[in-house]
Structures are given as C-alpha cells and as structure tokens.
C-alpha cells in the first residue's frame, strides 16, 4: 500500500462520509513514512481538524517519518508538542526516533541531550 493509494483512499472515505479515527490515520501514516514529509503533517493537521487528538502511536509514526529523513528539528518540535499534550507524553520510542533523526545528520550533541532527557524522565 503506497502513500498515494493511502491518500486517495482517505479522500474517498471523506467523500463517502465514512468516519475516520486514529486507526485510519495510523494506517495512512504508515504508508507515508517514505512519502513526502509535508503530507505527513497535512495528515496530522487533518486529523486535528476532525477533532481527533493524536495519541503516542500517531506521534511516534510522525517522529519515525522525521527520523527517516534526518529532520531532527521537526522531530524535536513534535517531542515538544507531546510534552505539552494532556493526552500523551513521549516514550522510549519517541525519544529513539528523535535520536535517530539526529544521528542521520551527525548532530551528536542534540542526540546525547535527548538521551539524557529520556533516561531522566
């Protein structure tokens, strides 16, 4: 299931008034891990606009997409969103994805800071 198919399926669901939930968005995010990063965030925004609050699984899938591209600054922004969230907090997977994103661009200082933060939470 490629990311184009996932987006098309979600669009069709919306046109046919099929209610989407966290699982729907989770499946779509799985296919977007290697798709355009802007689509990941459009999907996250769409989810929020429908009143569906991202859980730690959705956030971790988003962090994984950032990690695959080495976009550590976005990964840190997502971690910050999770820390501020009432519903979900970063877990070991969240921190590992952010650390992975740092390692892709050899930002070892930030990676070590994130590791220290993770073990002290």
Image (cartoon, rainbow, N blue to C red):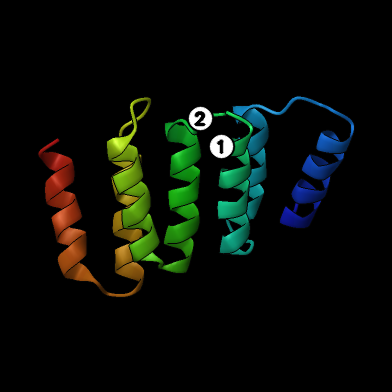
* Near-viewer residue (56 or 96): 56
The residue to which callout 1 is attached is 48
In the figure, is residue 22 to the left or right of 103?
right
Residue under the image location 87 percent in, 40 percent down? 12
The local crowd at label 1, few if under 14, some if 14 to 19, many if 20 or more residues have their Cα within 10 Å, is few
In the rendered image, the residue lying farthest to the right is 16
* Near-viewer residue (33 or 50): 50
Numbered circle sitting on residue 114: none
* Near-viewer residue (44 or 63): 44
The local crowd at label 2, few if under 14, some if 14 to 19, many if 20 or more residues have their Cα within 10 Å, is some
**Residues at discs 1 and 2 in contact (Cβ within 8 Å):** yes
Expressed as whole percent of the image width and height from the top left, the position of residue 118 reads: 18, 43
Residue under the image location 75 percent in, 47 percent down? 6
Expressed as whole percent of the image width and height from the top left, the position of residue 88 reads: 36, 29
User: Can you tell which quarter of the image residue 70 is in?
Assistant: bottom left
Q: Can residue 107 be seen in this view?
A: yes
Expressed as whole percent of the image width and height from the top left, the position of residue 94 reads: 34, 43
The residue to which callout 2 is attached is 53
Q: Is mark 2 on a helix, strand or loop?
A: loop
In the rendered view, tell whether residue 83 sits above or below residue 22: below
Q: What element carries label 1?
A: helix
* Near-viewer residue (17 or 63): 17
Expressed as whole percent of the image width and height from the top left, the position of residue 121 reads: 14, 35
User: Can you tell which quarter of the image residue 87 is in?
Assistant: top left
Measure how far apart labels 1 and 2 are at the Cα level: 6 Å
Q: Can residue 90 be seen in this view?
A: no
Disc with the residue nearer the chain's start (1 vs 2): 1
In the figure, is residue 70 to the left or right of 117?
right
């Amino acid at each position: 299931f490629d990311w184009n198919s996932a987006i098309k399926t979600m669009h069709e669901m919306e046109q046919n008034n099929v209610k989407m939930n966290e699982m729907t968005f989770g499946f779509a995010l799985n296919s977007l891990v290697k798709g355009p990063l802007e689509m990941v965030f459009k999907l996250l925004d769409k989810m929020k606009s429908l009143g569906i609050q991202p859980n730690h699984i959705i956030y971790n899938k988003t962090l994984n997409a950032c990690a695959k591209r080495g976009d550590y600054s976005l990964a840190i922004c997502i971690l910050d969103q999770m820390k501020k969230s009432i519903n979900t907090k970063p877990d070991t997977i969240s921190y590992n994805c952010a650390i992975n994103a740092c390692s892709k661009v050899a930002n070892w200082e930030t990676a070590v800071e994130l590791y220290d933060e993770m073990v002290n939470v």
